[in-house]
């Protein structure tokens, strides 16, 4: 009759069987569950229990209930509307009344097993409604033949308050799917545009930070090559940390240039003073040589005079002895 096996519907990488907007699921699920609770309240639980025990489609209540379900299904636009119960063995679940035309291919006669060897149709929500009397609905799921559906279940009670079955429905959710597609497209577009804007902003910030830092690096290379006349220009034109770095760097260059120029002046003066010392030393050396020569000449002259005097004295001695 129907297929409640929830398959994964992936869109933009999300599993929407688990991540559909909660308010949409709540709205649609509660709406269908409210319809099923009304249908359940209209079912004679004792007569229905007899159908479950006898599985007799000749019972007048069977056709009466079937026509009622057909009317509700056509009025509400449900894809399937049916009742389901445990059979006498207490283990097998079966369709009891199918709110579908008997000439339809997917019509299920009374007592048709819900689950087969190849497929388990009953969901947790189905079992909970059958055993605990708690109405509920499934997540949305997609089928090849009927598109997107979801299922809901409400318990059926007999006059003694015993759970004798459930009324279940499979409702189309294609309109909700279209709404989700639209919401998803809008959200993804906003996220994409936001991401693009943030990326652009980050790129601009990084560029604004790196560009002046790169210029400072270039200035540093110029200075390391001995060019202290480089003009450090702050291209940021703003009062921030980068601007402060530019100012400090410019002051550092000026102070360094001033120190180097002072050292150059001192070295130049020292070299000039050393040159004067050398000139004075050369002059002193020449004067000393001249004095030394004069002393030597005077000494030689004195020696000659002494020799002449000795000779004169000797001659006088000789003359005395002759007389």
Image: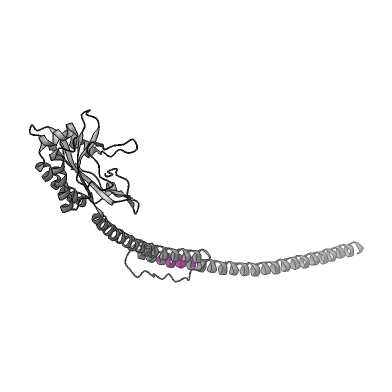
Q: Quadrant of residue 204?
A: bottom left
Q: Residue at x 20, y 29 (%)?
A: 88
Q: Is residue 157 visible?
A: no
**Count of numbered tags:** 0
- What color scheme is it? one colour
Residue 60 location, x and y as percent?
Answer: 13, 40
Q: Residue at x 44, y 64 (%)?
A: 216
Report the side of 171 relative to 188 (left or right): left
Residues 156 and 316: in front is 156
Extreme-top residue of the structure: 89
Extreme-right residue of the structure: 322
Q: Is residue 297 visible?
A: yes
Extreme-front residue of the structure: 58
Q: As displayed, is residue 50 above or below residue 66?
A: above
Residues 197 and 41: in front is 41
Q: As displayed, is residue 185 above or below residue 127?
A: below
Main SS of the magenta part reads: helix
Residue 124 location, x and y as percent?
Answer: 24, 38
Report the side of 312 relative to 63 (left or right): right
Which quarter of the image is occupied by the N terminus?
Answer: top left
Q: Residue at x 11, y 36 (%)?
A: 47
Q: Is 313 inside the magenta-drawn segment? A: no
Which quarter of the image is occupied by the C terminus?
Answer: bottom right
Residue 242 location, x and y as percent?
Answer: 37, 63
Tell me the magenta residue range: 251-260
Q: Quadrant of residue 130?
A: top left
Residues 17 and 188: in front is 17
Extreme-left residue of the structure: 159
Q: Is 256 inside the magenta-drawn segment? A: yes
Residue 171 location, x and y as percent?
Answer: 22, 49
């Amino acid at each position: 009759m129907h297929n409640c096996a929830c398959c994964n519907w992936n869109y933009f990488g999300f599993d929407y069987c688990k991540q559909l907007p909660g308010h949409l699921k709540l709205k649609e699920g509660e709406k269908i569950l409210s319809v099923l609770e009304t249908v359940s309240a209209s079912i004679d639980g004792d007569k229905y229990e007899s159908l479950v025990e006898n599985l007799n489609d000749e019972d007048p209540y069977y056709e009466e209930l079937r026509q009622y379900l057909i009317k509700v299904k056509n009025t509400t636009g449900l894809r399937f509307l049916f009742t389901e119960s445990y059979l006498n063995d207490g283990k097998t679940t079966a369709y009891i009344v199918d709110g579908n035309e008997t000439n339809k291919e997917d019509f299920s006669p009374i007592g048709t097993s819900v689950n087969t060897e190849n497929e388990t149709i009953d969901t947790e929500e189905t079992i909970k409604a059958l055993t605990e009397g708690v109405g509920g609905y499934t997540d949305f799921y997609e089928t090849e033949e009927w598109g997107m559906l979801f299922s809901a279940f409400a318990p059926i009670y007999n006059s003694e308050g015993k759970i004798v079955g459930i009324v279940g429905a499979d409702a189309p959710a294609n309109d909700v799917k279209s709404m989700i597609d639209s919401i998803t497209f809008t959200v993804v577009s906003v996220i994409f545009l936001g991401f693009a804007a943030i990326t652009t902003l980050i790129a601009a910030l990084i560029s604004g930070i790196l560009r002046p830092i790169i210029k400072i690096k270039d200035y540093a290379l110029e200075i390391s090559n001995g060019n202290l006349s480089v003009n450090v220009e702050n291209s940021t034109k703003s009062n921030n940390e980068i601007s402060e770095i530019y100012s400090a760097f410019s002051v550092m260059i000026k102070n360094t240039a001033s120190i180097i120029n002072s050292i150059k002046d001192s070295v130049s003066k020292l070299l000039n003073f050393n040159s004067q010392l050398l000139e004075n030393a050369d002059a002193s050396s020449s004067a000393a040589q001249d004095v030394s020569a004069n002393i030597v000449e005077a000494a030689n002259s004195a020696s000659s005079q002494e020799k002449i005097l000795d000779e004169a004295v000797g001659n006088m001695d000789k003359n005395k002895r002759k007389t």
